[in-house]
Image (cartoon, grey):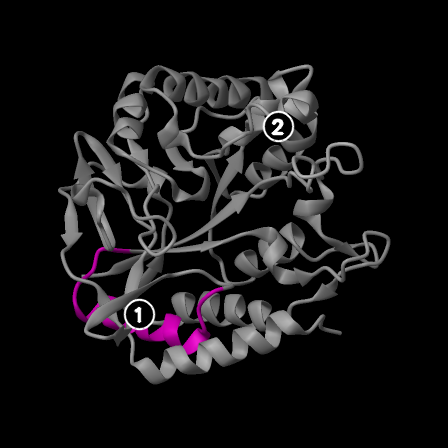
């Protein structure tokens, strides 16, 4: 059995501290995606080039509710660029952007603060948000999205009910170490699963160590997981016949910002190394293949009931490397 590897990219603008300081700060648009350095895109541009170098088609979950602040064209141009290069463009929703639907949003902050948790919205409101996203894809001139990822991987059963009402049948909403849903039936680690008629591909979650008899979980991301951990997860997934492994990243993870908006970012060489090693491994290893969720047929669900595990010493190495990497600004 071949294990499919989905490299997924949440492509989103930044609130930029506007909710904390509405007088002095404003949301940040394309620079938070392109991450330009010396005239070269070291965020999205670097990601696209790396995937294409190894013949991999990525799944880009493009956030649409930012149009409440920026209008259609800024993210629309990015989405069309990604699609034109042959990658899969799907729907991402951060509900906090709808706060800007209020003309007096800055005056509302003290009495009615924004939230970015879609599970705190009614099912009807969730339907409205999904349909807003679908309508945005139409205005962008792109095919209707078939796969949804919620912001912050916040999810509950109501999200799947709303998806059904909107005609969307595929999701990648779960990452248990990032957000643990209230409903135990959504405590899914890897593979793909049927949730009331919606095919869910959780971002892969694995066990990295035990603390006082309790498993500690880690969700598979470029910025959070070392390359040895990721390689171990992929090898074990292949050995155990796991149908799908899902990896999460963002364009901004490949640079470091030095706290001064006027200065160019520096390169995050650790994350860049991790992405390149992942792409090379997937491209070259027998039994692994790069895949996109939207292209898969209606095969039976293939749940993996237990977590994949990684030796604790790998986790300790990752913790040290991440601390050193996050403390430095690169070169």
Label 1 secondary element: helix
What residue sits right under mark 1 in the picture? Answer: 233
In the displayed orientation, state which residue is furthest to the right: 262
| Residue drawn 16% across the image and 67% down it | 240
Percent x, y for residue 140?
Answer: 59, 23
Identity of the residue drawn at 68% across and 41% down: 17
Q: Position of residue 76 (x, y in %)?
A: 63, 29
| Residue 211 percent coordinates (x, y) | 27, 74
Judge left or right: residue 144 versus residue 23.
left
Residue 146 shows in this picture: no
User: To which residue does mark 2 refer?
Assistant: 110
How would you rate the neighbour count of disc 1 (Cα within 10 Å): few for under 14, some for 14-19, many for 20 or more?
many
Q: Up-down: is 253 above or below 227?
A: above
Report whether 48 appears left or right of 240. right
- Residue 141: within the magenta? no
Discs 1/2, front: 2
Q: Is residue 260 among the parts visible in the rendering?
A: yes
Q: Is residue 140 found left or right of 288 in the rendered image?
A: right
Residue situated in front as seen by the camera: 225 or 24: 24
Q: Relative to 310, say whether 222 is above or below.
A: above
Q: Which residues are magenta?
A: 224-244
Tell me: residue 126, above or below residue 286: above
- In the picture, measured across the screen, residue 134 lies left or right of residue 211, that is right
The first of marks 1 and 2 along the sequence is 2
| Label 2 crowd (10 A; few <14 / some 14-19 / many >=20) | few
- Quadrant in which the C terminus appears: bottom right
Majority secondary structure in the magenta region: helix
């Amino acid at each position: 059995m071949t294990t499919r590897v989905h490299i997924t990219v949440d492509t989103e603008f930044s609130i930029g501290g506007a909710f904390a300081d509405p007088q002095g700060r404003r949301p940040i648009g394309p620079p938070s995606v392109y991450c330009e350095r010396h005239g070269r895109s070291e965020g999205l541009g670097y990601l696209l080039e790396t995937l294409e170098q190894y013949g991999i088609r990525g799944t880009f979950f493009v956030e649409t509710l930012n149009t409440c602040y920026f209008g259609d064209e800024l993210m629309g141009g990015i989405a069309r660029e990604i699609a034109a290069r042959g990658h899969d463009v799907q729907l991402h929703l951060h509900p906090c952007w709808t706060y800007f639907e209020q003309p007096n949003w800055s005056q509302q902050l003290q009495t009615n603060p924004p939230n970015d948790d879609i599970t705190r919205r009614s099912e009807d409101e969730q339907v409205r948000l999904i349909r807003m996203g679908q309508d945005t894809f139409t205005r962008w001139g792109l095919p209707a999205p078939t796969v949804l990822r919620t912001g912050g991987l916040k999810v509950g059963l109501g999200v799947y009910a709303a998806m059904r009402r909107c005609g969307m049948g595929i999701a990648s909403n779960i990452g248990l170490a990032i957000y643990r849903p209230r409903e135990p039936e959504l405590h899914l680690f890897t593979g793909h699963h049927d949730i009331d008629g919606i095919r869910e591909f959780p971002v892969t979650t694995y066990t990295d160590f035990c603390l006082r008899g309790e498993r500690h979980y880690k969700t598979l991301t470029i910025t959070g997981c070392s390359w040895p951990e990721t390689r171990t997860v992929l090898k074990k997934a292949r050995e155990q016949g796991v149908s799908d492994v899902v990896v999460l990243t963002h364009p901004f993870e490949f640079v470091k910002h030095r706290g001064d908006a006027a200065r160019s970012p520096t390169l995050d060489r650790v994350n860049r190394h991790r992405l390149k090693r992942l792409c090379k491994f997937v491209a070259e290893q027998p039994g692994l293949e790069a895949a996109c969720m939207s292209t898969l047929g209606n095969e039976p669900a293939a749940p993996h009931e237990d977590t994949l595990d990684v030796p604790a010493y790998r986790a300790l190495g990752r913790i040290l490397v991440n601390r050193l990497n996050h403390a430095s600004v690169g070169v």
